[in-house]
Image (cartoon, helix red, strand yellow):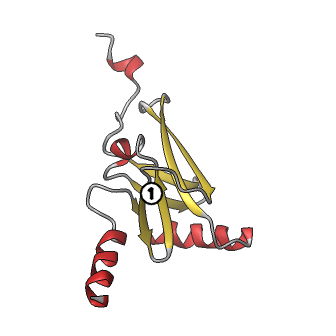
Amino acid sequence: MTTEAHTESTEATTAAPTGVILTDVAAVKVKALIEQEGRDDLRLRIAVQPGGCSGLRYQLFFDERSLDGDVVSDFDGVEVVVDRMSSPYLAGASIDFADRIDAQGFTIDNPNAQNSCACGDSFH
C-alpha cells in the first residue's frame, strides 16, 4: 500500500508533457531566490493575462497560497504553480533563465503565444 501511494505521488509531481517546463538553470535560480527570502513555503507562481505583443502577458512571482484548481509541478524541489485559468495558455511553455551580457532574467518560450504583433501582420 505504501509503495502504491508513493508511485502515485511520483507520477503527480512529474511534469506532464502538457504542463509548464522549468529548465534546470531556471530551477537553480528560483531556489537561490527563495533561499534569499529566507522562507521555505514559497513557490513560483506563473499567471497569464491577455495583452502584450505576443497576445499574452506573463506574471512570475513567489506565492505561498494554494488556490482551488492550481496545477502544481515539481522540478528538483522547486514547485511551479499555475492557476486553472492560466493553465491552458501555458501548456508546453518552457521557462528558462538567461544570464548573458545582452539579456538577464527569466524567459518564457510559449508555443501557445502568437509569435509576432498582430498590428503589423493584419494589414495587407
Identify the residue at the far front of this view: 1
> What residue is shown at x 62% (from left), y 57% (from top)?
62
Nearer-the-camera pick, 63 or 2: 2
* Quarter residue 119 falls in: top left
Q: Is residue 22 above or below residue 102?
A: below
Q: Amino acid at mark 1?
A: Ile
Which residue appears at 41% of the width and 45% of the height? 84
In the figure, 20 relative to 25: above or below? above
- Please tell me whether residue 56 is drawn above or below residue 28 in the rendered image: above
Left/right of residue 51 with respect to residue 43 in the rendered view: left
Residue 104 picture location, percent across and down:
60, 56
**Where's the N terminus, which quadrant?**
bottom left
Q: Dot 1: what SS?
A: strand
Q: Which residue is mark 1?
A: 95
Image coordinates of residue 45 in percent, x first then y, are 53, 54
Which residue sits furthest top?
124
